[in-house]
Image (cartoon, grey):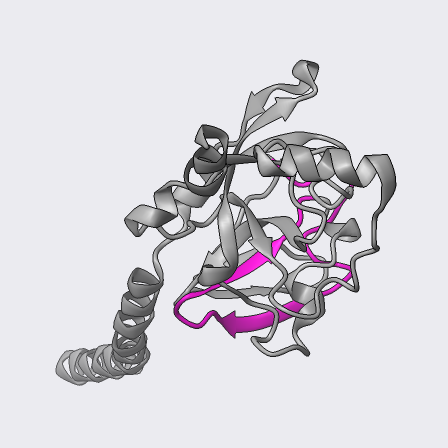
Amino acid sequence: MLALLIKTFLVQAFSIPSNSMQNTLQRGDRVLVDKLTPWFGSTPERGEVVVFNDPGGWLGESPEQSGFGAAVQQGLSWIGLMPSAEDQDLIKRVIAVGGDTVSCRKGGPVILNGKELDESEYLFPGNTACDDQEFGPITIPDGELWVMGDHRQDSLDSRYHQNLPGGGTVPESKVVGRAIVVAWPVNRWSTLPVPSSYDDIPSAAMATAVATAAGPAGLGLALAVPLVLWRRRTLLRKEESAQR
C-alpha cells in the first residue's frame, strides 16, 4: 500500500526510451519524476524537464508485451519503479508556457518573448536550435506548453505536431510530473535543474508591456527627429539673416 501511495502521489521512476533528450538523458536512464507538486497547484515552468501523456497522435500504437518480461515490468510498475507498458508517456523540456510567444528560424536561436534563448547549457553538441524544423512565431494558449527535446535533430517534439489539435502544444493536464533526478545507472546520478538562461527571459506580460511602450516611444522619436532638424535649419537661416 505504501508503494502504491508513493507511486500515485509522490515520485515515480520512468525509463528513457529514446535519444531525444541527449546528452541530458541517455537511452536507458531511469529518472525520478515529482508527481506531488502538481497536486498543490504548481504548473510546469520554462526549462523544466517533464514527463507527459501522449496528447494524441504523437505516438503510434504501443506494442503488446507478453511473457516473463511483461510480468516483471507490470510488477515494477505497480511499485513505481517502471512505467506501465500501457502508458504512452514522453519526456521533453518545457520551452514556453501559456501566454509566451516563441519562434525559431533556420540558422538562428529560439526567440522567446522577444529575447534570444541561450540553450548552450543543454543542447546536444553539434545540434542547431531548429534548422531541421523552424517554426512560429506562435503564442501559446493558456494552460498549454511548447516542448522540445535537447537532442534537437533527433526529437519529434512540438515542432512536428503542429498539424494536430492543439497545434503542437501539450495541455498542462497531460503532465505526469517533473523529472528531478537521474537515479540509474549509479554512475550517471545527477539532478535536473532549470538552466540559468531561463532567468533572463521576460514574462509574457512584461514582453507585451515593453512592446506596447516601445510603440508610442518609437513613433515619438520618428516625429521628433525631423522636427529638430527643421528647427535647427530655421535658426541657422535667422542667424545668417542677422549677420547680413
Q: Is residue 166 left or right of residue 6?
A: right
Q: Nearer the viewer, residue 146 or 213?
A: 146
**Image location (x, y in percent) of residue 188:** 67, 19
| Furthest residue in direction left, as rendered | 242
Above or below, 127 relative to 86: above
Q: Is residue 102 left or right of residue 74?
A: left
State the image quarter where residue 118 is shown: top right
Q: Nearer the viewer, residue 78 or 197?
A: 78
Instruction: Evaluate whether residue 22 shows in this view.
Output: no
Name the residue at 53% across, 54% down.
Answer: 95
Name the residue at 59% across, 57% down.
Answer: 53
**Image location (x, y in percent) of residue 166:** 56, 75
**Image location (x, y in percent) of residue 18:** 77, 43
Q: Nearer the viewer, residue 214 or 202?
A: 202
Name the residue at 54% across, 61% down.
Answer: 146
Instruction: Evaluate whether residue 54 shows in this view.
Output: yes
What residue span does the magenta drawing correspond to? 122-150
Q: Main secondary structure of the magenta part?
A: loop
Specify the quadrant that holds the C terminus: bottom left
Name the residue at 41% across, 65% down.
Answer: 98
Q: Nearer the viewer, residue 119 or 84?
A: 84
Q: Is residue 60 left or right of residue 223?
A: right
Above or below, 41 relative to 26: below
Above or below, 220 relative to 127: below
Is residue 5 on the magenta stretch? no
| Furthest residue in direction right, as rendered | 67
**Image location (x, y in percent) of residue 12:** 54, 36
Count of numbered circles on the image: 0
Is residue 129 on the magenta stretch? yes
State the image quarter where residue 156 is shown: bottom right
